[in-house]
Amino acid sequence: MKNKIRTGLLSFGMSGKIFHAPFVKAHPEFELVAVVERTQKRAHEYYPGIKSYASVAELLNDDEIDLVIVNTPNNTHYEFALQALRNKKHVLVEKPFTSTSEEAAHLFREAAKNHCHVLPYHNRRYDSDFLSVKKVLESEKTGQPVEVYFRFERYKYTIGEKRFKEEAIPGSGLQYDLGSHLLDGVISLFGIPRRWHKTLGAYRPGSEVDDYVHIHLEYENGLQVFVKTSLLVLSPQPAFVINGTRGTYVKDRTDVQEKQLLEGMQPGDPGFGVEEEHREGILTWLDDRDVKHTEKVAAAPASYLGIFEAVYQTLRHHKPYPVTEAQILAQLNILEG
């Protein structure tokens, strides 16, 4: 028990209930110790014996806690992560990591100063659809990538209730919400671009923030990557398109983990992270004799346990964390630019 990573959650809203607590509980090397609940005290109904604090400061002063998960509103990530590091806690920070690259760089310096780790939480690297794209690229059947499209599209005409997403405050807007996921995926696969151009728009009536984002990323080898996210797409296009010198891969957004978690399924349950039937990606490629092939690519089952395993390996075995400081700084340079 003493070697488990004793973990505290700064919020028990949707992200805490859905994206964090179930995986902390499911991973044998973690223990969920405490949570911050300012008003309703509900965590004990799911996790008997858990400590429920009324404030972030109370949780950060708990000497039992090794790791703090910062899953509070976007504009608080920097402040709370900094407080946690100064309390000698390791920190796992939800996206967006911070609102600016300057804040992010300060957190990394503060972590080193306090001999702690500050780790970005980018769970979409462990989506089944994204992992299928990674697998196809590693197979090299598409040849050298030439043109890539990453999309995350929804239809949400009305203004949402979450202030930190909809009001003109640091870290708000669609580019910081879904755009950070897309940029992280692109940078993790293709590296840091040499230059980029960004177009933002606000089209919903009364919107104070961007609800349309288009980013064109250019790479040294000539690769062109187009990132798009919008809240006004009633019929979403394929989420991933890879056009290469020898083939094309097309994949819809098909990961089911969020839907399953909202329905009450838990990591490790039969069928968890398994895509629905007939949602395979389509790979079209030329072999060495220029014969055209078309095949369906079924994605392997996926689980966000992967990111908690990465956290465990970094904290306990000092292995490099997959989301690097350089990647986060590059992402934030684009978002804030």
Image: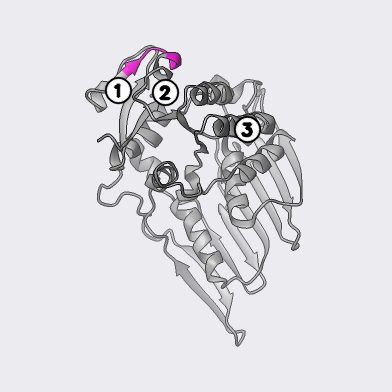
Q: Residues within 10 Å of mark 3 (few under 14, many from 20)?
A: many
Residue at 66% across, 37% down:
332
The dot on residue 43 is: 1
The dot on residue 247 is: none
Kind of residue sitting beneath label 3: Ala
- On the image, the x and y values in percent for residue 81 come to 53, 26
Which element type, helix, strand or loop, lies under badge 2?
A: loop
Residue pointed to by mark 2: 11
Residue pointed to by mark 3: 104
Which element type, helix, strand or loop, lies under badge 3?
A: helix
Quarter the N terminus occupies: top left
Q: Earlier in the sequence, mark 2 or mark 1?
A: 2
Q: Where does the magenta region start and end?
A: 52-57
- On the image, the x and y values in percent for residue 186 come to 61, 51
Q: Nearer the viewer, residue 11 or 142?
A: 11
Q: Earlier in the sequence, mark 3 or mark 2?
A: 2
